[in-house]
Image (spheres, grey):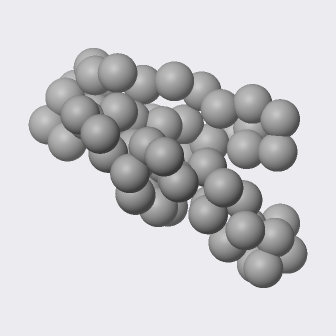
């Protein structure tokens, strides 16, 4: 998380239905977040790499995004 605060780390912009979100990889964990403003981020969801994208898409559809 310290690396993310400094703009470093294994960060990837997501595509398709998750466009606008980014992911940070820390070992087997993935953290999905959005950049709100210059130095402000919103952590949306975290889980293991094998289920994170499927479960997060389900959460977004329930939210009505």
Could you tell me which quadrant the N terminus lies in?
Answer: top left
Q: Position of residue 46 (x, y in %)?
A: 40, 58
Q: Is residue 28 left or right of residue 55?
A: left
Q: How many marks?
A: 0
Q: Is residue 4 left or right of residue 63?
A: left
Could you tell me which quadrant the C terminus lies in?
Answer: bottom right
Q: Quadrant of residue 58?
A: bottom right
In the depicted structure, whether residue 43 falls above or below residue 35? below
Residue at 38 percent across and 35 percent down: it is 24
Q: Is residue 64 visible from the viewing direction of this image? A: yes
In the depicted structure, whether residue 55 falls above or below residue 11? below
Residue at 48 percent across and 46 percent down: it is 50
Q: Is residue 42 visible from the viewing direction of this image? A: no
Taking the view exactly as shown, the residue that stands out farthest to the bottom is 62
Residue at 65 percent across and 32 percent down: it is 14
Q: Position of residue 8 (x, y in %)?
A: 27, 20
Q: Position of residue 64 (x, y in %)?
A: 85, 75
Q: Position of residue 13 (x, y in %)?
A: 60, 27
Taking the view exactly as shown, the residue that stands out farthest to the left is 2
Q: Is residue 42 left or right of residue 14?
A: left
């Amino acid at each position: 998380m310290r690396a993310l605060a400094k703009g470093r780390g294994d960060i990837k912009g997501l595509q398709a239905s998750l466009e606008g979100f980014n992911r940070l990889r820390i070992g087997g964990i993935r953290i999905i977040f959005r950049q709100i403003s210059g130095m402000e981020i919103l952590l949306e969801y975290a889980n293991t790499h094998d289920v994170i994208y499927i479960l997060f898409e389900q959460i977004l559809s329930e939210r009505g995004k």
